[in-house]
Image (cartoon, rainbow, N blue to C red):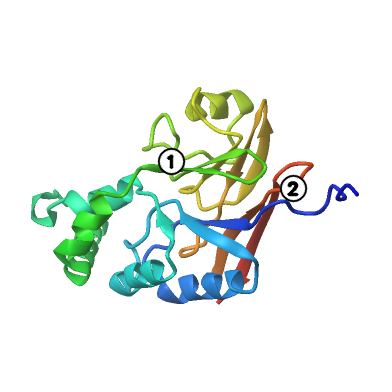
Amino acid sequence: MALPPTVPIGKTIAVLSDVHGDLRALEAVLGELGKRDVIETYVAGDHLFGGSEPLEVWRRLGAAKAVLARSLGDLALATLDPDRVAARTDEEREKRERLASTRRAVGELVLKALAKLPPSLRVTLADGREVLVVHGAPTDPGVDVTHDLSDDEMLVLLGHDAADIVVVGGAHVPFQRELPQMRVVGVGPVGQAPEGRNAHYVLLTPHYEGTRVEEGWVAY
């Protein structure tokens, strides 16, 4: 007897992004994911900088066995010497000090591990569809893929080697867009959500009729 098309044919994966060193937000999301049948968690970047508990976030991601991609912000945190960063305004000086304090908090071993993370992740689901997880645009990691782009603008940023589903972080605004032969999913941030204390996540579940995408959030 054939299975109805609504029955999943594989386990769910979760995609997160932009934890920004916020342990409370991360714990809220991981607690929510613990209630779901999630086989693996992927995180698109901006893991540590910005919050007060970067080392604790790094350790918690490791304990959760999350698979991490690296953003340009992560690379900057890992490689920039704050003493060599020019700061002309109070805001720039404050950011430089946060950079220095975050680097001190996590230590050299974490910084080296952060620098070695891949800039993107590719996952093949049980339905055969490929998922690309990346923080910025695949063609230019310094540019965010945002909801207000036209289809043509988005296609240029995604390039010719995308995937069936492309999950992007960075913009801090969740969205979905259907493009020719691919779906683009903007995952909202775990930390520093513009609307306040809401930690976002995306669940991808392979089904016969296509991969089901669920965007969610949990208050913390």
| Residue neighbourhood size for the residue with mark 1, other residues' Cα within 10 Å, grouped as few (<14), some (14–19), many (≥20) | many
Q: Does 112 sit left or right of 147 as displayed?
A: left
Which one is closest to the eye, mark 2 or mark 1? 2
| Identity of the residue drawn at 36% across and 42% down | 119
- Residue to which mark 1 is pinned: 136
Instruction: Classify mark 2: helix, strand or loop.
Output: loop
In the rendered image, the quadrant that contains the C terminus is bottom right
Q: Which residue extends farthest front?
A: 1
Place residue 200 in its image quadrant.
bottom right
| Identity of the residue drawn at 55% across and 66% down | 199
Q: Where is residue 19 in the image (x, y as percent from the top left)?
A: 43, 63
Instruction: Classify mark 1: helix, strand or loop.
Output: loop
Q: Does 43 sit left or right of 151 as displayed?
A: left
| Residue neighbourhood size for the residue with mark 2, other residues' Cα within 10 Å, grouped as few (<14), some (14–19), many (≥20) | some
- Residue to which mark 2 is pinned: 207
Place residue 155 in its image quadrant.
top right
